[in-house]
Image: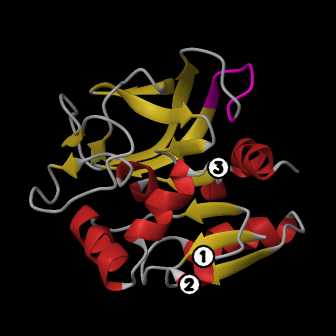
Amino acid sequence: MIGVVDYGAGNLRSVTNVLSALDAPFRTVRDGDELRNVERVILPGVGHFGQLARALDELALRAPLTAMVGEGVPYLGICLGMQILFATSDEAPDARGLGIFAGDVRVIDGAERLPHMGWNTVMRTRPSTLLGDDDTFFYFANSYACPVIDDTVGVCEYGSAFSAVVERGTVCGVQFHPEKSGAAGRTIIERFIGA
């Protein structure tokens, strides 16, 4: 069973539509108790870093999510769901992320226009479970981005280079929206759920 976190915002419907099309068993979860007995977690993300950080605390999701990641339960963070894996964000300097990955989310540097909206190439930097062997186009919608770190397996360039995909063991994050990226995005979700 896949648990799709519903924190009151985000791209929940688009993600669950893809899971339904793949005949993947899932349920939406809104608190820590509902996370029990899920085998994988997807945290879709559209919105504001501070809003998501507050929601994780108000819904008692922060500690269970952190524990599950520590126990090796596969986690896929999409867009803001990836950014919350880091410690902090320029978008909400007082808000606290999960701190799974080192570094801070920053406003995209050097971009002519924000948000970064539309299709862009993700270039693999090392072997990746999610990306497979090819550089691929995906759909982005972001003004903030995660730094390139040791766990980065794919980068995107828009103004400057930033992490488009991070992977460490069973925890993964993608800055783009696979649920809005056609066949290539569907393949990302299939690889995550083991379809």
Q: Is residue 121 left or right of residue 113?
A: right
Q: Amino acid at mark 2?
A: Asp
- Whether residue 134 sits left or right of residue 101 in the image: it is right
Residue position for label 3: 181
Residue drawn at point x = 66 percent, y = 71 percent: 3
Residue 86 placed where, x, y %? 32, 45
Residue 100 or 109: which is nearer the viewer?
100
Majority SS type along the magenta span? loop
Tell me whether circle 2 and circle 1 mark residues in contact (CB < 8 Å). yes
Q: Which residue is mark 1?
A: 35
Disc 2: which residue: 33
Is residue 110 depicted above or below 75 in this figure?
Answer: above
Left or right: residue 158 compared with residue 38: left
- Of the pair 114 and 70, the residue shown nearer to us: 70
**Residue 134 shown in magenta:** yes
Residue 6, image x and y in percent? 52, 79
Earlier-in-chain disc, 1 versus 3: 1
Label 3 crowd (10 A; few <14 / some 14-19 / many >=20):
some
Q: Amino acid at mark 3?
A: Ser
Q: Is residue 62 visible?
A: yes
Scheme of colours in the image? secondary structure
**C-alpha span from label 2 to label 3:** 32 Å
| Rendering quarter of residue 157 | top left
Q: Residue at x 36, y 50 (%)?
A: 83
In the rendered structure, which segment of residues is drawn in magenta?
130-136
Report crowding for label 1: few under 14, some 14 to 19, many 20 or more residues within 10 A (C-alpha). Answer: many
Circle 1 sits in a helix, a strand or a loop, which is it?
helix
Quadrant (top left/top right/bottom left/bottom right) for the N terminus: bottom right
Residue type indicated by callout 1: Leu
